[in-house]
Image (cartoon, grey):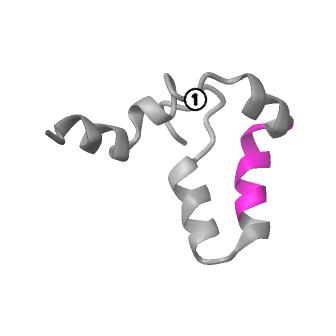
Amino acid sequence: MCKKCPVGVDIPKFIDYIKRGEFKEAAETIFKYNSLPSICGRVCPQEIQCEGGCVLGKKDKQLP
């Protein structure tokens, strides 16, 4: 479970499945915690919540 995701989706696991081309498993990861992902994807302020807690976001802050 992702601590930064308000509905608790395991985002790192989801991304890993996508990287490996395991799209069914990726979808199952989303639907395990969120029955309305397309709606949440439109209304959720990702830049504050999950993207704000992302490793990439932390690395960007360290760049000159």
Residue 7 in picture, x, y percent from top left:
66, 30
Query: Measuring 73% from the left and 48% from the top, which residue is drawn there?
Result: 30
Whether 17 is drawn above or below 40: the answer is: below
Query: Measuring 51% from the left and 33% from the top, which residue is drawn there?
Result: 50
Magenta stretch, main secondary structure class: helix
Residue 8 in picture, x, y percent from top left:
61, 35
Whether 27 is drawn above or below 57: the answer is: below
| Residue toward you, 55 or 35 | 55
Query: Measuring 80% from the left and 38% from the top, which residue is drawn there?
Result: 37
Label 1, residues with CA under 10 Å away: few <14, some 14-19, many ≥20:
some
Residue 32 part of the magenta-drawn span: yes
**Disc 1 secondary structure class:** loop
- The quarter in which the C terminus is drawn is top left
- The quarter in which the N terminus is drawn is top right
Amino acid tagged 1: Gln
Residue 20, by quadrant, is bottom right
Residue 33 part of the magenta-drawn span: yes
Query: Count of labels shown?
Result: 1
Residue 26, by quadrant, is bottom right
| Residue toward you, 34 or 50 | 50
Residue 25 in picture, x, y percent from top left:
73, 66
Q: The magenta stretch spans which residues?
A: 26-35
Query: Could you tell whether 4 is left or right of 6 in the image?
Result: left
Query: Residue at label 1?
Result: 46
Query: Could you tell whether 35 is left or right of 41 in the image?
Result: right
Most extreme residue toward the front, as rendered?
Answer: 64
Residue 42 in picture, x, y percent from top left:
77, 29
Query: Could you tell whether 47 is left or right of 57 in the image?
Result: right
